[in-house]
Image: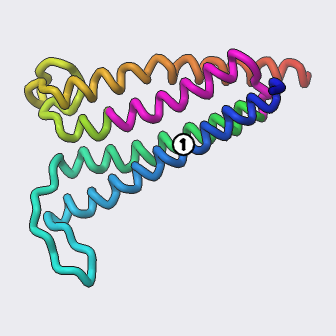
Amino acid sequence: MTANSNSRRIANLMIANGMSVLFVGLLAGVMLVFSLLGVVTLWPLPEWHVLVPGSTRGWQAAHVGGILNGVMISGAALLALHLQLEGRRMQWVGYGMILTGWANTVFYWAGLLAPNRGLSVAATPFGAGDLAGAIAFLGGGSGMAFTFIAAFILAKAGFERAREAS
C-alpha cells in the first residue's frame, strides 16, 4: 500500500467515524426532544410516559457535541488530505481524531447520567461522584490529549505548506 493510499484509507475511516459520531449526536437530539416534552411521543403512536434519564442540559450537550465532533473529525480528514499528511503524522491525526470523537461521545452520554456532570471522578459543586461520572471523566480526558496532538500536527503542516508556497 502506498503512502498516499494509506492516507486516503485513514481519511475515509475518519469520515466514516465522524459521520457515525454525528449520527449518535442526532440520536441525542431525539432524546432531547423527549426530555423537553417529558414523554416519548412518535405520532401516530400513543405517548409513552417514561422517565427520560439525564437532564435537558445534558441532552443538549450530547446533541450539539456529537454533531460538532462528527464535523470536526470529517473536517480534519479533509484537511489532512489537503495538507498531504502521510505516515506517522497521518496516523496520529487520523486515529487521534477518531479516538477523540468516541471519547467525547462517552463523556457526553455518561456525563448526562452523572450527578457531577462527569467533570471529575470525585464530587463537584454539581453533585457527587459515581461510576457514570468516572466513566465520563476518564473517557473524555483520555481523548483530550489526542485532540491537542492532532490540532498541533495539522497547524504545523499548514504552516509548512504555506512556507513552501511562498
- Is residue 102 shown in magenta? yes
Quarter the C terminus occupies = top right
Q: Position of residue 136 (x, y in %)?
A: 27, 29
- Please count the marks in the image: 1
Q: Kindly state the secondary structure of the residue where label 1 is placed.
A: helix
Q: Nearer the viewer, residue 123 or 133?
A: 133
Per the image, the residue denoted by label 1 is: 18
Q: Position of residue 17 (x, y in %)?
A: 54, 41
Can you say whether 56 is above or below 153 in the image?
below
Can you say whether 51 is above or below 17 in the image?
below
Q: Position of residue 36 (x, y in %)?
A: 20, 61
Residue drawn at x 22%, y 63% as measured from the top left: 34
Q: Quadrant of residue 137?
A: top left
Residue drawn at x 15%, y 55% as measured from the top left: 52
Give the residues in magenta: 82-106
Q: Quadrant of residue 159?
A: top right
Can you say whether 44 is above or below 96 in the image?
below
Majority SS type along the magenta span: helix
User: Left or right: 151 with respect to 37?
Assistant: right
Mark 1 burial class by Cα count in 10 Å: few <14, some 14-19, many 20+: many
Residue type highlighted by circle 1: Gly
Q: Quadrant of residue 40?
A: bottom left
Q: Nearer the viewer, residue 116 or 41?
A: 41
User: Left or right: 69 with respect to 120?
Assistant: right
- Is residue 21 shown in magenta? no
Can you say whether 85 is above or below 49 in the image?
above
User: Left or right: 10 with respect to 136?
Assistant: right
Residue drawn at x 71%, y 35% as measured from the top left: 9
Q: Residue furthest right?
A: 166
Q: Position of residue 12 (x, y in %)?
A: 67, 40
